[in-house]
Image (cartoon, rainbow, N blue to C red):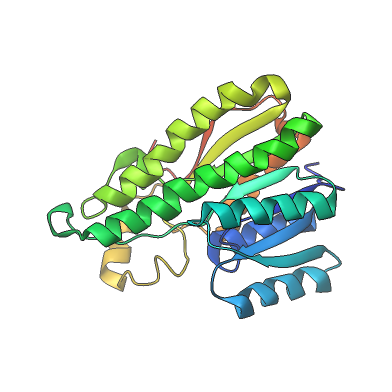
Amino acid sequence: MYRLDDKVALVTGASRGIGRATVKALAARGARVFVNYHANAEAAASVVAEIQADGGTAESVAFDVADSKAVDAAVSDIAKRAARLDIVVANAGIAKDGLLMRAKDDDLQQMLDVNVRGSLALARSAIKPMLRARRGRIVFISSVIGEMGNVGQTAYAASKAALLGMTKSLARELGSRGITVNAVTPGLVDTDMTARIDDEMRAKIVAQIPLGRFGAPEDVASAVVYLCSDEAGYVTGHVLRVNGGMYI
């Protein structure tokens, strides 16, 4: 079940956290994976080494998702070398928290460039080989914050909510070509991004989560694997919540 043998997958922001867990999960099910990173070559190399040690096929690829030309060049190169591109997971994202009234223009622009424009650029480039093959899977990693909002995260919420509109519109555009487009909205997940939350605040948050814990990156990765599988061939335009019941 959920095998991905002979599939080619690209995951952005895959050197750590949810991206790392996702690319490892895809590889474990037979996909040839491309591990995107922007700056941390060592971490990306570590992921590739782990996958290869487990018998999988992986290689790293460096580009900044905020640079649309770099995205297009990388995607085109992957599709050419692998002779196909079946799966793309737009996971790369950043958060710069704070009250909107104090937000700096540069911080706002950077979040939009990475979280929104980066995801759009990735999808736009990946569509080309997928259209030729008349099949494909596109998955956007959004956030529970994009659905429910949060104090001090107005700009971040806006950027993640944008991915949901992208998901639904692109699903309508590409459905007739055999390409599905879905989104996953993780809740609070144990990653570098949430490591800065102190114990007192963590306890308060956990008290609001029916399952009583933060998620693990692997929880999100499992949802992505399903959406990329043949078993999810009739699922498109869907937003899959992986939040422990934090937002229902």
Instruction: List x then y, in percent, for residue 32.
Output: 80, 56
In front here: 235 or 119?
119
55 relative to 234, above or below: below
Position of residue 152 in the picture relative to residue 219 (left or right): left
Instruction: Residue lying at the far bottom in this picture: please name it.
Output: 42
Instruction: Residue lying at the far left in this picture: please name it.
Output: 101
Instruction: List x then y, in percent, for residue 46.
Output: 68, 77
Q: Is residue 165 visible?
A: yes
Instruction: List x then y, in percent, for residue 210.
Output: 40, 47
Quadrant occupied by the N terminus:
top right
12 relative to 178, above or below: below
In front here: 72 or 108?
72
Q: Quadrant of residue 45?
A: bottom right
21 relative to 187, above or below: below
Q: Residue at x 73, y 36 (%)?
A: 130
Position of residue 114 in the picture relative to residue 236 (left or right): left
Q: Is residue 186 visible?
A: no
Position of residue 160 in the picture relative to residue 13 (left or right): left
Instruction: List x then y, in percent, for residue 135.
Output: 76, 32
Q: Quadrant of residue 39?
A: bottom right
Q: Quadrant of residue 34?
A: bottom right
Quadrant occupied by the C terminus:
top left
Q: Residue at x 43, y 51 (%)?
A: 115
74 relative to 119, above or below: below
Number of numbered callouts drawn: 0
In front here: 237 or 166?
166
Q: Residue at x 65, y 46 (%)?
A: 88
Q: Residue at x 27, y 65 (%)?
A: 201
